């Protein structure tokens, strides 16, 4: 029994070292780094208990990919996923910084406008900072006036400071 536990511990340590070594290896190509990211993402079993160590390692690996492969088409996507994981770990301000970095650094990224909208959403719903949320929503409207995200921003501004229950009631009155 002790031998099985010891073997399990050795296997776990070897896996951790291989993930860390692969991700940090300066000689890996972007394609090889992508394989590491894919493997780590597959290792996150979303149906099971939240594994902080795996998530933290994946957050770091996304950053390492972006540093090593800044012009790769996957970089803004990985950084957006990184922001989502940071938000999930309660690191809201870091997630906001990451989303703003993606928005500002990758103007041709197809989810760029959504990144800007999410910044407003995080200020409103996670940090409960209506002033900053309104500023971010107005930024979306100014930069992307004809977008779906601008429409969402307009609606969000209208409902800032109103409880979710009151928002629901306002829609019920309309009908």
Image (tube, rainbow, N blue to C red):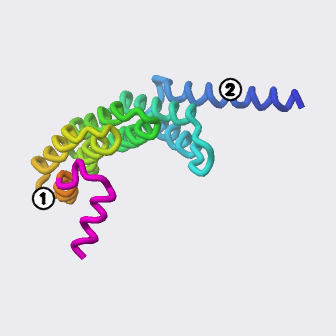
Up-down: is 92 above or below 149? above
Secondary structure of the residue carrying numbered label 2: helix
Please tell me how many numbered marks the rendered image carries: 2
Residue 149 in view, yes or no = no
Image check: 126 left or right of 16?
left
Q: What residue is pinned by disc 2?
A: 13
Q: Residue at x 44, y 33 (%)?
A: 29
Tell me residue 100's x, y (percent).
25, 36
Up-down: is 84 above or below 20? below
Tell me residue 1's x, y (percent).
89, 32
| Mark 1, other Cα within 10 Å: few <14 / some 14–19 / many ≥20 | few
Tell me residue 166's x, y (percent).
28, 59
Q: Nearer the viewer, residue 114 or 20?
A: 114
Q: What residue is pinned by disc 1?
A: 146
Q: Nearer the viewer, residue 44 or 32?
A: 44
Foreground tag (2 vs 1): 1
- Separation (CA) of disc 2 from disc 1: 52 Å
Q: Between disc 2 and disc 1, whose residue precedes?
A: 2
Image check: 19 left or right of 113?
right
Tell me residue 66's x, y (percent).
37, 32
Q: Which residues are magenta?
A: 158-175
Q: Residue at x 51, y 43 (%)?
A: 38
- Assess whether residue 160 is covered by the magenta stretch: yes
- Assess whether residue 152 is covered by the magenta stretch: no
Magenta stretch: dominant secondary structure = helix
Q: Nearer the viewer, residue 66 or 29?
A: 66
The quarter holding residue 134 reads: top left
């Amino acid at each position: 029994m002790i031998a099985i536990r010891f073997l399990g511990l050795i296997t776990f340590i070897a896996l951790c070292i291989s993930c860390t070594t692969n991700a940090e290896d300066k000689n890996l190509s972007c394609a090889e780094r992508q394989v590491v990211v894919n493997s780590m993402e597959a290792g996150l079993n979303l149906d099971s208990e939240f594994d902080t160590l795996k998530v933290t390692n994946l957050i770091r690996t996304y950053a390492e990919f972006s540093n090593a492969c800044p012009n790769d088409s996957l970089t803004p996507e990985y950084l957006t996923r990184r922001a989502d994981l940071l938000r999930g770990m309660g690191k809201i301000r870091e997630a906001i910084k990451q989303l703003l970095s993606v928005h500002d650094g990758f103007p041709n990224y197809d989810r760029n406008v959504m990144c800007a909208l999410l910044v407003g959403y995080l200020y409103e719903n996670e940090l409960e900072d209506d002033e900053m949320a309104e500023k971010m929503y107005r930024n979306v409207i100014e930069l992307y006036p004809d977008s779906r995200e601008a429409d969402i921003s307009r609606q969000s501004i209208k409902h800032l400071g109103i409880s979710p229950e009151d928002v629901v009631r306002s829609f019920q009155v309309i009908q």
